[in-house]
Image (cartoon, grey):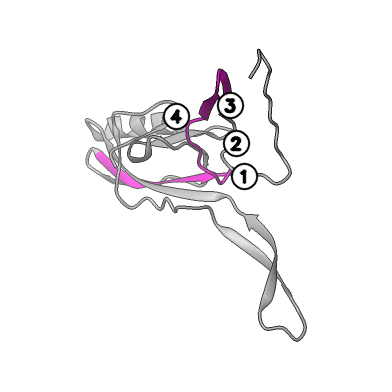
Amino acid sequence: MNSFTFDSISKPYLTALKGSNRQPWAPIEWTYQDVPKRPGALPVKKNTRVRPLTLPVFLKSNSIEDLQKVKEDLAEWLIHDEPKPLIFDDESNRIYYAVVDGSFDPDEILKWGQGVIPFICPDPYKYGDEESLLLGDYPIRNEESVKQAHKRIDKIENKGEF
């Protein structure tokens, strides 16, 4: 992985390193109900928790003084009150919505820095491009990335005879 964009911005002084823990799904916790005289238990409720993303990075600068300015720019770029789109170069067809959660304390060696940016995705899912298909001359769009129980809205307009 070389880099990433956050809030539609990437920085030339930052390189993402190997070691990011982008797991294939968000953490899931189940609630189970024991049933008398039956082995095991029955699953009752699934809770999908927030998705943590830790991102090891390398910072490049021209001097130790410039490195301090780079860290200030990094904070200005990454700190927001609402989740922003996070896209990794090696997974460019997927979007995470993330905020920084925690601190960034890079190891500094001369004019370089190395540390871990702690992102968290309150919405634990990752999203792809919208998909649409044509039914004759009528476009049908998939506006959902996750299956949701009891929610389905179909809209087909009759613009002529079939």
Mark earlier in primary sequence (1, 4): 4
Q: Is residue 122 left or right of residue 87?
A: right
State the residue lying farthest toward the top. 160
Residues marked 3 and 2 touching at CB (< 8 Å):
no
Residue flagged by tag 2: what amino acid is it? Glu
Type of amino acid under label 3: Ile
Local packing at callout 3 (Cα closer than 10 Å; few below 14, some 14-19, many 20+) is: some
Label 4: how many Cα within 10 Å (few below 14, some 14–19, many 20+): some
Please determine whether, in this image, residue 142 is positioned above or below residue 1: above
Where, quadrant-wise, is the C terminus in this rendering?
top right
Q: Does dot 3 land on a helix, a strand or a loop?
A: strand
- The residue segment tinted magenta is 112-140
Label annotation for residue 144: 2
Distance Cα–Cα, label 2 vs label 1? 7 Å
- In the displayed structure image, the side of residue 158 where residue 49 appears, left or right: left
User: Residue 82: x and y, percent?
Assistant: 59, 33
Mark carried by residue 77 = 4
Q: Residue at left 66%, top 13%? A: 159
Q: Which residue is mark 1?
A: 147
What label sits on residue 140 in the rendered view? 3
Q: Nearer the viewer, mark 3 or mark 2?
A: 3
Q: In the structure shown, which secondary structural element does the residue marked by tag 1 occupy?
A: loop
Mark nearer the viewer, 2 or 4: 2
Relative height, residue 151 to residue 138 (above, below)? below
Q: Is residue 114 magenta?
A: yes
Indicate the amino acid at tag 1: Lys
Task: Give the crowd class for mark 1: few <14, some 14-19, many >=20 residues within 10 Å.
Answer: few
Where, quadrant-wise, is the N terminus in this rendering?
top left
> Is label 2 in contact with label 1 (beta carbons under 8 Å)?
yes
Callout 2 crowding tier (Cα within 10 Å): few <14, some 14–19, many ≥20: few
